[in-house]
Amino acid sequence: MTSTTVADYVLKRLREWGVQRVFGYPGDGINGLLAAWGRAGDRPVFVQARHEEMSAFEAVGYAKFGRRLGVCAATSGPGAIHLLNGLYDAKLDHVPVLAIVGQTNRSAMGGSYQQEVDLLSLYKDVAGEYVQMVTVPEQLPNVLDRAIRVALAERAPTAIILPADVQELEYTPPGHEFKMVPSSLGIDWPKIFPDDAALHYAADLLNAGERVAILAGSGARSAREELKEVAELLGAGVAKALLGKDVLSDELPYVTGSIGLLGTRPSYEMMKGCDTLLTVGSSFPYTQFLPNLNQARAVQIDIDPKLIGMRYPYEVNLVGDAATTLRALIPLLKHKQDRSWRESIESDVERWWETMRMEAMVEAKPVNPMRLFHELSPLLPADAIVTADSGSAANWYARNLRFRDGVRGSLSGTLATMGPGVPYGIGAKFAHPDRPVIVFVGDGAMQMNGLAELITVKHYWRDWSDPRLIVAVLHNNDLNQVTWEMRAMQGSPKFPQSQTLPDVDYAAFAASLGMGAFTVDSPEQVAPAWERALGADRPVLLDVYVDPDVPPIPPHATFEQMKDSAEALLRGDENRWGVLREGIRTKMQEFLPHRDGGR
């Protein structure tokens, strides 16, 4: 009878925890694990990315959209290093991910050996909630069980380090003796109820408010119906933090959309006009987009006591699950009879969406990027999952894409790193192989790693019951977000040597992999391209030639500020005339007559 190795036991324990997939890349530092995978019949399934960083991003996407633990694996040294960016994405967006990484043999440690990196020190920040090295078999299963529990409990990345020689040792369990630590499977979560006195205090505060605003984040995703009821009782509008874009449908007339630099004008105006703020499941960091510090009384609800009370001087900080807390709060709230505040919010929202339609239809050379998002909104399948990369794609995702109930969406919210768009989409497909996934990605991120990860799509897409994974590339040959930040924040013109990208035929590359591929270089082609992609029987890439001069105008920008920025650009920006033309055309839509007859 063949003995069970440490590596065999690790995979067995992952299966017992219900782990179905591990995103990884091979290397000799995990050869023992790879051999065990072969003996285990590829259970859990090993999903091979093109790069370890993509493995980590795929694990994050899988965890975000699957609402479960994500697991990634990499070899020692460079492989473990490559995981870091994706793990930091998990850390900053509070996503449970377990990293399993190799290490050189114990006999070589401390000897400046090949690929020897002090991984405990390296991972101490990114996996600071729990990182341990296994040096003897008896440390398992405790180390692995704790790494999983801590990742789930803290919604954070954790890591275990397995030296190569330890992976091949015969597994012996911890015994019933001194300095042994037995372990067990599973975890049953409690329901966290808020303090009753604090609930009454919060209700009194909210009932006293005349102009209530709600800020909802990703922590409120399980409380959709409760949020709707609270908003109705209080006559409130609801703004959504970027990671909470899918918490409530944008078809609700009082949902003002995103908040912040990537936010909407109704969200901005609501926060400037409210006298009461209720924040649910969000740690939105940009205080300047919240009410002035002496303007509003405020209540926060969050399940994490380490994050509550931040960002604003809240009078009441309720620790508890969002849905449970709101259900307890609802009987204490009074229905506000004066609906004038709610009516003004709904009027602003109606006008905003009409403005967005008008801006999306502004002529551009060749395609207005806003139109790409605007045309998708009515076509979005009810069960679609949408991801966006960082950069200008995030602007239009946040402002112009209109979600309805059932649609999920996310991006790198806090780290705002380039590159996760396509691997997030792949992770989403493995979490929900029966749902269509749509990815928006700039050509900079596509060149950085998206092109290579299309090979992963080619490798696995036939395993998905719904084969639709649509990658829409915003093709403008410019690192557009940084270009605009240079103009707006630095007062500097575009620096072509750093900002201009080499031209690539993205559609041709996708076609070479057997994907559906459509080039879109006129506005009339946008809607038909979406229809063809959504009706395809395989993954599709849309290579959309968009105008880099269409400005991502912040919600608080005035016409005078736009005019001043354009004048500054005339002092040497190579795109100055296009920026001036598109900036004025776009901003003017706010002041032109609207179909709703609004002001």
Image: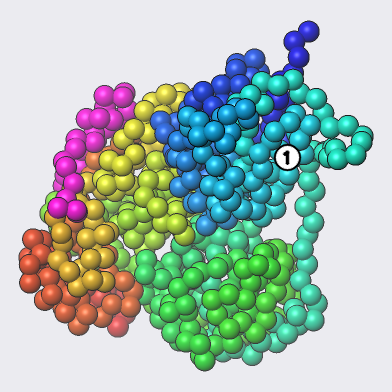
Tell me the quadrant of the picture where the N terminus can be found: top right
Q: Is residue 557 visible?
A: yes
Q: Is residue 501 magenta?
A: yes
In the rendered image, residue 233, in percent from the top left (x then y), is placed at: 63, 78
Answer left or right for 495 relative to 17. left
Q: Residue at x 19, y 73 (%)?
A: 491
User: Which of these two is toward me, 270 or 89?
Assistant: 89
In the rendered image, residue 445, in percent from the top left (x then y), is placed at: 31, 46
Total residue callouts: 1
Compared with residue 456, is residue 345 higher up or lower down, i.e. above or below? below
User: Which of these two is toward me, 128 or 510?
Assistant: 128
Compared with residue 583, is residue 443 higher up or lower down, i.e. above or below? above
In the rendered image, residue 124, in percent from the top left (x then y), is placed at: 58, 51
The colour scheme used here is: rainbow
Name the amino acid, label 1: Val
For the residue labelled by badge 1, is the local secondary structure a helix, a strand or a loop? helix
Q: Is residue 149 magenta?
A: no
Question: Alpha-carbon neighbours of circle 1 within 10 Å: few (<14), some, or many (≥20)?
Answer: many
Q: Residue at x 80, y 25 (%)?
A: 172
Answer left or right for 193 relative to 93. right
Q: Is residue 247 visible?
A: no
Tell me the quadrant of the picture where the C terminus can be found: bottom left
Compared with residue 482, is residue 30 higher up or lower down, i.e. above or below? above
Q: Quadrant of residue 458?
A: top left
Compared with residue 310, is residue 535 higher up or lower down, i.e. above or below? above
Q: Residue at x 90, y 39 (%)?
A: 178
Q: What residue span does the magenta drawing correspond to?
A: 497-524
Residue wearing tag 1: 143
In the rendered image, residue 518, in percent from the top left (x then y), is placed at: 24, 35
Q: Residue at x 49, y 25 (%)?
A: 27
